[in-house]
Amino acid sequence: MHINVWHEMAESKVGKAGLLLIGLVVFLALFAPVLSPYSPRENTDTPAFSRPSEDHWLGTNDARQDIWTQLLYGARTSLSVGFGVALLSALISVLVGGTAAIFGGLYDRFWMRIVDATMAIPDVIVIILVAAYLRPNVLLMILLLSALSWPGGARVIRAQTLTLKERMHISAARTFGAGWSHLLFRHIIPDLGPILVAIMIQDARRAVFMEAGLSFLGISDPSVMSWGKMMQYARVFTYLEVWKWWLLPTGLALSTTLIGLSFTGYSLEAALDPRLQEPHHHEGDI
């Protein structure tokens, strides 16, 4: 039975909600300079710990900085890390998992042992050790999280490629002498489109959560605004009323992003697996 994955996602209420939430966060990040006249590091003329007002929608922090502006630019950091890790880890997963399935033999066994070893490494410990010797920044965070995220996707890609390479059109291409790159990029990847998107969404969700958690622990670039860093600073002032418009909106923004990615990933998984699909009701059904 052929399944139109994108149509099933469009019909899913969960999928629509997920895309709507992600679209909202992307909109806020892209139009941050339009939605706020301030810079995230700018010390305004308004007193510290000011309540929300027309000039400062979420008030100001201890350094007289506009919290709404920091929230917008924090979205940019989270989305940059999430999408960057999703793209890079998916590329590595495709190259490793796809070529392992195509070549097989010793090459396949070698990469699967690398996958097993990488999945056994505790991510946070590795990142903390690297951060102790290198200055943390967004690019380093993307590279580290990608290096630790690709093994799970590589396993899925390998399993799917083992099935796909036995199909008629791919077997015919191999018979006519098509190389591994032609098979992988012209035949296998197009067939794996929805699965690749699901893997990327999963990696992006994990990366956004990890970036916020590491920033909360202080492992981040101090010159870059981050939701985790905002929550770390706000936690110090929980004895003041400021936490209501500093800590809560930041946690809500992070939760909204994670929920949006989770809903989208779930709806895509349901579209790929008919057993998880929502029942469709049509007019005239009894």
Image (tube, helix red, strand yellow):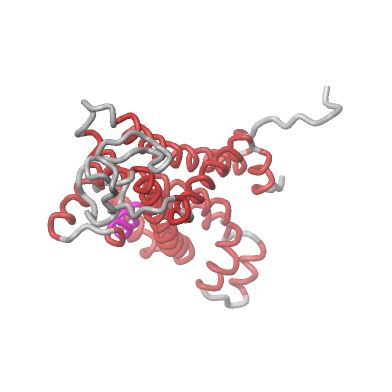
Q: Residue at x 42, y 45 (%)?
A: 205
Whether residue 90 sits left or right of residue 223 in the image: it is: right
Q: Quadrant of the C terminus?
A: top right
Nearest to the observer: residue 63 or residue 153: 63
Q: Position of residue 61 (x, y in %)?
A: 27, 40
Nearest to the observer: residue 109 or residue 80: 80
Q: Position of residue 260 (x, y in %)?
A: 50, 40
Outermost residue, left side: 133
In this view, 45 is above or below 172:
above
Q: Is 147 a magenta residue?
A: yes
Nearest to the observer: residue 24 or residue 280: 24
The quadrant in which residue 83 appears is: bottom left
Camera sees residue 151: no
Outermost residue, top side: 286
Q: Position of residue 54 (x, y in %)?
A: 43, 40
Outermost residue, front side: 45
Q: Residue at x 47, y 55 (%)?
A: 34
What is the span of residues highlighted in magenta in the rendered image?
141-149
In this view, 245 is above or below 269:
above
Q: Quadrant of the N terminus?
A: top right
